[in-house]
Image (spheres, rainbow, N blue to C red):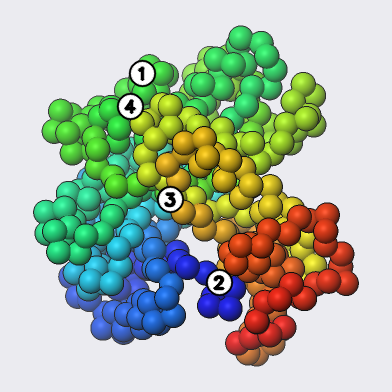
Amino acid sequence: MVDTGLEAYRFSVSWSRLIPNGRGHVNPKGLEYYNNLINELLKRGIQPHVTLLHLDTPQVLEDEYGGWLSRKIVKDFTAYADVCFKEFGDRVLYWTTINEGNIFAIGGYDNGLAPPGRCSFPFGQMCTEGDSVTEPYIAGHNMLLAHSSAVKLYYKKYKAVQHGFVGLNIYSSWFSPYSNATEDVTATQRVIDFYIGWFMHPMVFGDYPDIVKKNAGSKIPVLTPRESKLIKGAFDFIGLNHYNLVYVKDNPSSFEMNVRDITADTAASFFLEPEDAPQNQNDDPSSSLSGILEYLKTAYGNPPTYIHENGQRTERNGTLYDISRVKYLHSYIGTLLEAIKNGSNTKGYFQWSFLDGLELFGGYETGSGLYYVDLDDKQLRRYRKLSADWYYNFLEGRTIRPDEITEVETGVFGSSTSKASE
């Protein structure tokens, strides 16, 4: 990280590693592990940004009361956050409560593609239990309550001494109308309200967006006046995970289904590739980032924002010449800089990811890292890619255009790193 020029590193604490039973006894080896990591980062001048939950709810709490489907988790999550604030808060200034709360609720409780893998037919076909119709809304509601409870705790017990910041992370593509038809434009706003407003609206205005309440009906829990007061304003920053542009087409027939999940409630269809929307073929994919940042600015008061994830997933084939990733980063970071010039309150940027790792979708078959990890090597040797060189130079103030690079130049941009490091 030092050789790459990183100023900050974002990582997650594992709730189960720190508190094996979900509550109560704290594992001293877990404390030691995270203390060592935090201390080493700080020793090297790298600021730790800590996420408290990244899909990995303790199994014991899933078994006991259903995890995020129960209000009981609010108390347990707050107690877990208290341990983290107490043990690490003298050195950690930036805390994110939950990673991708909106997608965690959908992936975990609607389509079953993420832990805990709950869903119901026909919205997910590989689950043994769940209810895609109601559970995403319940889980999302409890996440907002748990997040806000942890923020309240931090401000009450730790803010005055530690002077840190607590935020919530959401995932969002940016959404563009499939066509200029009024129906598609209206559908796009509907989708934005469901995927972004679902979490942002309560935190800024104290309630869910009107269209979400209307279309979800009794499936989405009602925020009581007390809950509304707890959630409203309960954040110091917003973490944003963003990768791409999605096109939206009005699909009223989905809303006419007798049984609807959250996607059907949007009454829209989604298209990932530009060629699926001929009228938009000339869109610059990286413009999606400026789109969502502009929306956060105009709709939600321009909150302090950290880009927590942005990067390109490619086949994990061992090539170090990842010119496509360089083009991606050059485009998106350039767009981000323009957005900041235009008034976006973005405070930082984290590329996903530093090392090739185990990806939620793709496992070890795909990689997003600046560094390749040789899984066939017992030492798991790391090799830097072209993108690591490009990123190093960018952080040093030298922006190299992708069209200036040829394959023969891989690894000769002036970085002090060696070809491989352990």
Asked which secondary structure carries label 2, the reply is loop
Between disc 2 and disc 1, the foreground one is 2
**Residue at horizontal 60 percent and vertical 11 percent from the top:** 183
**Residue at horizontal 65 percent and vertical 90 percent from the top:** 378
In space, the residues marked 2 and 4 are separated at their CA atoms by: 41 Å
Total residue callouts:
4
In space, the residues marked 4 and 1 are separated at their CA atoms by: 6 Å
Query: Which residue was labeled with disc 1?
Result: 210
In space, the residues marked 2 and 1 are separated at their CA atoms by: 45 Å
**Residue at horizontal 52 percent and vertical 35 percent from the top:** 342
Q: Does the residue at mark 4 contact the one at mark 1 (Cβ under 8 Å)?
A: yes
Q: Mark 2 vs mark 4: which is more N-terminal?
A: 2
Between disc 3 and disc 1, the foreground one is 3
In the image, residue 270 sits, relative to residue 171, either above or below, namely: above
Circle 2: residue type: Gly
- Is residue 186 visible in the rendered image? The answer is yes
